[in-house]
Image (cartoon, helix red, strand yellow):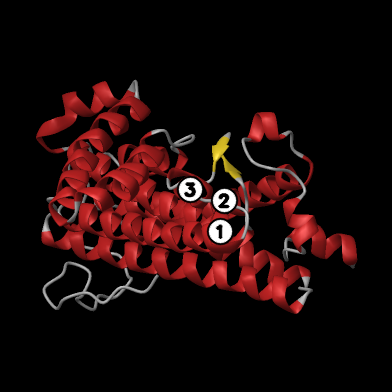
Amino acid sequence: MGLSLPADHAFAASVHPDVDRTASADPGPSAEEARAVDHDVPGGLQRMAEAVLAERVAEAAEHDPVFADEVARRVADFTLRGGKRMRSRLLWWAMRACGAADTAAALRLGVGLELIQTCALIQDDVMDRSPTRRGRPAVHIALAERLGLPAGSGPGGAFGASAAVLAGDLALVWADDTVAETCLPPSRRRRITAVWRAMRGEMIAGQYLDLRGQAVGAASATTALRTARLKSALYTVERPLALGAALAGADRRTTDELRAAGRYAGTAFQLRDDLLGAFGDPAVTGKPSGDDIRDGKPTYLLAVARA
């Protein structure tokens, strides 16, 4: 999933991941609009996502109409019918808690987070060979079936997996482009870019450790917790909170306290998700149960059970 970025891309510049101590929270001119979104953050995010993704699909159609119809629209639809919107909500409320009201920027960054999640879920399902996601066929299954190919194995399975990797890459590209095109003051952009870059790298590192643990066949409880933190906790809770704080221009102490709270909450979220993955009801969770145990994934739950 590595991307080669041009020198003038917003993420190509080298920035230090420290916070901007000189920045201060500024409610700005959109306080009334922000208060309206407060009552329905998912609704505000959905409207922004529809606008952003319509532009992305139109751009894809300029490249090739078949690609746009079969891949780009699927990525957009997957994102628009997304789950709980937890990451974008956390970003929003961190910004608001820090006293800011930059509605458009917060919602665009939230769309970026949802696209990162789309990338992670699509490619995670390929790696885990999961047949369903959110109660529907996983993207690699749907892409094969779209061409009338058997999705389980053989050429159809190989096509579906390869095409889904590209779909995930497209979601990641769209996420970066959405953040890069967000209007931000220079000091806030530097901070947000630093958090964004760290979050992407952490997520991929965590996924690699997850795959490595399955290949090796065992993992200590310490390694399992580190994997959970990198793969999920950071980009699910801690980094979205940090993005909201950065957007608001929060000081170092506030940012550090939000990150610490997010680190523990994110780890707890992943541990609960591991329990649901092992024992949850697929009709409720929207994904198969028991896959982690069957595949020997290096979860903390399995590490403790083996100890």
Between label 1 and label 2, give the one nearer the viewer. 2
Whole-number angstrom distance, CA of label 1 to CA of label 2: 7 Å
What numbered label is drawn on residue 139? Answer: 3
Q: Quadrant of the N terminus?
A: bottom left
Provide the secondary structure element on which disc 2 rests. loop
Q: Estimate how packed mark 1 is, as few (under 14), some (14 to 19) or many (20 or more) residues with alpha carbons within 10 Å.
A: many
x then y, percent, for residue 157:
56, 58
Q: Is residue 268 above or below residue 223?
A: above
Q: Three-letter amino acid code at disc 3? A: Val
17, 6: nearer the viewer: 6
x then y, percent, for residue 115:
36, 49
| Quadrant housing residue 181 | bottom left
Horizontal arrangement in the rendering, residue 140 relative to residue 59 (left or right): right
Identify which residue is drawn at 48% across, 53% down: 122
Q: Three-letter amino acid code at disc 2? A: Pro
Identify which residue is drawn at 18% across, 29% down: 31
Identify which residue is drawn at 79% across, 57% down: 294
Whole-number angstrom distance, CA of label 3 to CA of label 1: 12 Å
C-beta proximity under 8 Å, tags 1 and 2 = yes
Q: Which residue is mark 1?
A: 157
Provide the secondary structure element on which disc 1 rests. helix
Mark sitting earlier along the chain (2/3): 3
Between label 3 and label 1, give the one nearer the viewer. 1
Q: Is residue 189 above or below residue 72?
A: below
Whole-number angstrom distance, CA of label 2 to CA of label 3: 14 Å
x then y, percent, for residue 206:
55, 68
x then y, percent, for residue 211:
63, 70
Q: Which residue is mark 2?
A: 150
Mark sitting earlier along the chain (1/2): 2
Q: Estimate how packed mark 2 is, as few (under 14), some (14 to 19) or many (20 or more) residues with alpha carbons within 10 Å.
A: some
Horizontal arrangement in the rendering, residue 256 relative to residue 265 (left or right): left
